[in-house]
Image (spheres, rainbow, N blue to C red):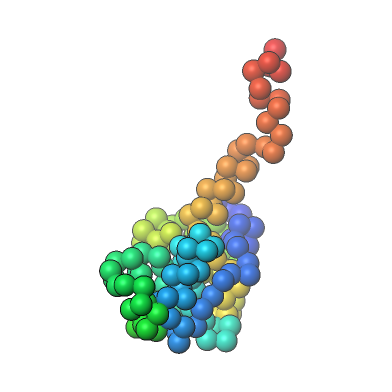
C-alpha cells in the first residue's frame, strides 16, 4: 500500500477559499460540507491552509468570524506533496507533524488535491474488505 501513488487516494476538486475571504465563510463551509481543512489559494496557487481547529481555538463569536479575513489566521508554511509521491511519504508527513491533511500540488505549486488521514484509512479499508462481504457471512462458510 505505501508504495502506491498519492493520486490513487487524493481528493481532487477541493473546496478552497482565498486569503480575503472571511473566517465566517470558512466556518460555514466546515459545518455544511463536514470537512476540517480548507486550502487557501490565490488563483490556483496554494498560499495557505485553515482548519476547523484554527477557527475553534480563537473562541470568537459568529459576528467576529464574519469580520476576520482568513489571511490573519491561515497557516502559510505548509508541507505539500506531488501526485506521484508515494503514499508512504504522505503517511510520514501526517505522522511526523501530527497533521491530518496534506495538500497535493503540481510543479507550479497549483493545488490539485488533498490527502487526509481519512482518505488513507478509507483506502486501506477498501483494500482489506471487498465490496461484497457475503462470502464472509458465517452461514456461507463451510
Give the image quarter of residue 92. bottom left
Horizontal and vertical percent for residue 127?
Answer: 63, 42
In the image, residue 78 above or below residue 101: below
Along the horizontal axis of the image, is 66 left or right of 137?
left
Task: Name the residue nearer the viewer: 42 or 99.
Answer: 42
In the image, residue 138 above or below residue 10: above
What's the residue at 57%, 86% (across, down)?
43
What's the residue at 51%, 78% (across, down)?
17
The C terminus is located in which quarter? top right
Give the image quarter of residue 5. bottom right
Along the horizontal axis of the image, is 23 left or right of 15?
left
Instruction: Looking at this view, name the residue that lies furthest to the front.
Output: 63
What's the residue at 64%, 18% (across, down)?
138
What's the residue at 63%, 67% (across, down)?
12
Task: Name the residue nearer the viewer: 49 or 81.
Answer: 49
In the image, residue 25 above or below residue 94: below
Horizontal and vertical percent for residue 63?
Answer: 36, 77
Residue 87 appears in view: yes
Total numbered labels placed on residues in the image: 0
In the image, residue 28 above or below residue 9: below
Horizontal and vertical percent for residue 15?
Answer: 56, 71
Horizontal and vertical percent for residue 61?
Answer: 31, 72
Task: Name the residue nearer the viewer: 107 or 35.
Answer: 35
Instruction: Looking at this view, name the residue that lies furthest to the top.
Output: 142
Residue 5 appears in view: no
Amino acid at each position: 500500500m505505501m508504495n502506491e501513488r498519492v493520486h490513487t487516494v487524493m481528493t481532487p476538486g477541493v473546496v478552497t477559499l482565498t486569503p480575503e475571504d472571511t473566517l465566517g465563510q470558512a466556518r460555514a463551509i466546515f459545518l455544511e460540507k463536514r470537512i476540517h481543512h480548507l486550502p487557501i489559494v490565490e488563483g490556483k496557487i496554494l498560499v495557505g491552509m485553515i482548519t476547523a481547529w484554527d477557527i475553534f481555538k480563537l473562541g470568537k463569536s459568529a459576528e467576529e468570524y464574519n469580520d476576520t479575513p482568513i489571511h490573519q489566521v491561515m497557516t502559510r508554511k505548509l508541507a505539500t506533496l506531488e501526485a506521484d509521491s508515494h503514499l508512504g511519504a504522505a503517511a510520514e508527513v501526517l505522522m511526523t507533524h501530527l497533521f491530518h491533511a496534506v495538500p497535493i500540488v503540481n510543479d507550479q505549486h497549483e493545488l490539485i488535491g488533498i490527502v487526509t488521514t481519512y482518505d488513507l484509512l478509507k483506502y486501506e479499508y477498501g483494500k482489506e474488505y471487498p465490496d461484497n462481504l457475503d462470502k464472509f457471512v458465517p452461514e456461507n462458510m463451510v
